[in-house]
Image: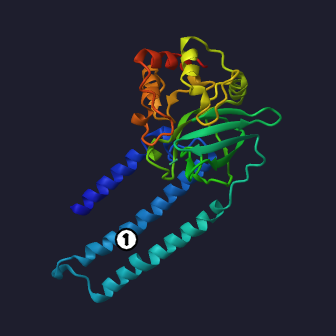
């Protein structure tokens, strides 16, 4: 009875873990994640065969004395279910999975994207061949069908870059650059997550991933390269409160490099590294008390701003399309 309950709970947990198709290896949008899913399902099938054999053995072990097998029958059962079948299944899985050990040859990258993990956000720099680099934050856009090389580093502590639907995870280590080469097969909006404990808000370090058709991606990157144009009361408040000491908005005089680049902030769909929906109220609330959303965040609080002032800055930032 207890065993049945454990099986049901484990099965339900497994099924639920696949529910969020935006962040799931079981709903891949890239070839590497499709391989990982395939490996997982075949390994799971092998594990089920072996576990079923062990369950049968256990059932015989707890039989009432009058139902017990003879010594000879028992030994044969142990030999087959505990020895021959698991050995054949495990050897079969080993031989079958060996080709997956080799990295998939994707050829030279069409685009390099440098991603730096910081407590608790992602600095994203697009480095298209033959053109100037473009910096952004917390949202990664990639063209479908083109090979992309992520150049992964960390500014402070070890983070791990993981987009479950695209590829396996890779550590981001201070002082070292790791390269993850990927290719998306399907357009859509997905989600990634920091996969290495990096401090109080590790669990709140997510990122949006947008896979776009190549022509749409090129147009988007060209627009991203242009400086921001929004102005208004919020722009003056942004400067007066020294926000530009940390944040870049690519216009004259706004070149802080400590915090996320906000040049096209308004075009992103989430705030605070994939944590909050991009609404004016959320942005204003985050400006006044970022630590309430992200414990341990480096950005100082601005409680001295009135609700109206924070809202004006939020509206200005959202206007940066
Ligand atoms: Cu960054 Cu965990």
Q: Is mark 1 within 8 Å of ligand 1?
A: no
For label 1, the SS is helix
Q: Position of residue 93 (x, y in %)?
A: 54, 66
Is disc 1 surrounded by few (<14), some (14 to 19) or many (20+) residues within 10 Å?
many
Residue closest to the eye, 296 or 88: 296
On-image quarter of the N terminus: bottom left
Picture quadrant of residue 223: top right
Q: Is residue 187 visible?
A: no
User: Which quadrant of the figure contains the C terminus?
Assistant: top right
In this view, the residue farthest toward the right is 130
Q: Nearer the viewer, residue 287 or 300?
A: 300
Q: Residue at x 47, y 46 (%)?
A: 202
**Residue toward you, 105 or 259:** 259
Name above or below for residue 306 compared with residue 64: above
Residue 40 shown left or right of residue 115 in the figure:
left
Q: Is residue 94 left or right of residue 1?
A: right
- Which residue is labeled 1 in the image? 53
State the residue lying farthest toward the bottom: 71
- Measured from the top left, where is residue 116 in percent x and y? 63, 44
Q: Report the side of 264 relative to 278 (left or right).
A: right
Q: How many marks?
A: 1
Residue at image position (51%, 74%) is 88
Left or right: 261 with respect to 149?
left
Q: Quadrant of residue 171?
A: bottom right
Residue ID at (63%, 47%) = 31
Residue 41, horizontal then vertical, whole percent: 49, 55
Please say if 149 is above or below 228. below
- Residue 213 sits above or below residue 306 on the image: below
Q: Position of residue 102 (x, y in %)?
A: 68, 61
């Amino acid at each position: 009875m207890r065993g049945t309950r454990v099986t049901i709970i484990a099965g339900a947990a497994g099924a639920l873990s696949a529910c969020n198709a935006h962040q799931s290896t079981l709903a891949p949008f890239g070839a590497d994640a499709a391989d990982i899913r395939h490996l997982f399902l075949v390994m799971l099938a092998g594990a089920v065969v072996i576990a079923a054999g062990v369950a049968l053995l256990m059932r015989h072990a707890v039989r009432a004395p009058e139902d017990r097998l003879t010594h000879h029958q028992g030994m044969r059962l142990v030999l087959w279910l505990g020895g021959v079948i698991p050995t054949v299944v495990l050897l079969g899985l080993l031989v079958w999975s060996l080709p997956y050990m080799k990295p998939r040859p994707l050829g030279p990258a069409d685009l390099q994207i440098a991603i730096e993990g910081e407590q608790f956000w992602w600095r994203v720099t697009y480095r298209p061949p033959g053109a100037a680099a473009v910096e952004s934050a917390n949202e990664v856009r990639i063209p479908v069908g083109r090979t992309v090389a992520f150049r992964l580093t960390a500014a402070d502590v070890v983070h791990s870059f993981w987009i479950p639907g695209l590829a396996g995870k890779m550590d981001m280590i201070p002082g070292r650059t790791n390269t993850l080469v990927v290719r998306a097969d399907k357009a859509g909006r997905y989600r990634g997550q920091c996969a290495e404990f990096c401090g109080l808000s590790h669990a709140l370090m997510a990122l949006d991933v947008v896979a776009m058709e190549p022509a749409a991606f090129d147009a988007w990157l060209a627009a991203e390269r242009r400086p921001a144009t929004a102005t208004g009361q919020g722009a003056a408040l942004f400067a007066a409160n020294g926000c530009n000491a940390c944040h870049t908005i690519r216009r004259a005089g706004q070149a802080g490099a400590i915090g996320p680049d906000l040049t096209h902030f308004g075009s992103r769909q989430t705030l605070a590294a994939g944590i909050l929906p991009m609404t004016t109220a959320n942005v204003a609330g985050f400006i006044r008390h970022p630590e309430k959303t992200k414990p341990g965040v480096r950005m100082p609080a601005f409680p001295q701003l009135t609700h109206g002032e924070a809202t004006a800055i939020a509206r200005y930032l959202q206007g940066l399309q």
